[in-house]
Image (tube, helix red, strand yellow):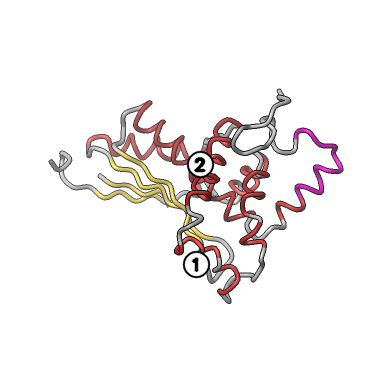
Amino acid sequence: MNGDLVGEVDTKHDVTGVWTGGSDSKFSSETKEKRVLWRRSHPLYVPTTIQILELLANAEIYYKLRDQSGVAYSSEFEYTLNRRHSGGMWTLEVSTQTPLYRKALDMSIKAISTIRFNDVDLLSAKAYLLDNYSAQQDDLAFWVEMMRGLQDDTVARDIRCINEYEKLVKSITLSDLYDVWGSFNTSPSQILASVALSGETPPE
């Protein structure tokens, strides 16, 4: 069955180079305000934050549905950006046994509507993105995608899309995650669900 659901620490993280209490935790309130303004006015703020949210949401939902409850084979959370209009659409696809589909559906809705994030997982997601970014420096296809921000008429042409990605990733905080996540409309009453059944037992 497939279903879709449309204390501060005075040390720096080894990989991301940010304070483990959040990238703003060591600065005055005035400096924090300037840093928040810089991040949230950056052309990569939303897409970069969504990259992190996808990693965290996928890990959390997979753990709850498969490892913790055993009601699903797999789950995949994904956000699709609408390049012609502001906004996009998120989907959660879950595979399970037919007898468990109702329980899997209910638990999927609960998982996506009650998800919470923490600093440890945020740091891990940042490290993953930065490692991946570093590993692709010699990949031509990677640079073609990075240059899209300077070539595509449907997006703002801004050199910051290329030379400030690492800096922005390092600066993202938990408050930024919830800032963007709040626009995802994940309350149970806002979620559209569909179920596809394939017999009483899963295929061999």
> Mark on residue 8?
none
Residue corresponding to mark 2: 128
Report the magenta residues as a range.
Answer: 25-36
Front residue (pair 5, 118): 118
Q: Main secondary structure of the magenta part?
A: helix
Between 131 and 55, the residue placed more toward the observer is 131
- Against 35, residue 161 (above or below) is below
The quadrant the N terminus occupies is top left
**Location of residue 120 by image quarter:** top right
Q: Which residue is mark 1?
A: 144
Query: Residue 159's x, y, as percent?
Result: 66, 66
The residue type indicated by label 2 comes to Tyr
Q: Position of residue 37 (x, y in %)?
A: 77, 52
**Residue 42 placed where, x, y %?**
69, 58
**4 is within the stretch colored magenta:** no
- Farthest residue to the front: give it: 138
- The residue that appears at 48% across and 43% down in the rendered structure is 55
Q: How far across and how far down the image is residue 51, in percent?
A: 53, 49
Q: Are marks 2 and 1 in contact (CB under 8 Å)?
A: no
Q: Secondary structure at mark 1?
A: helix
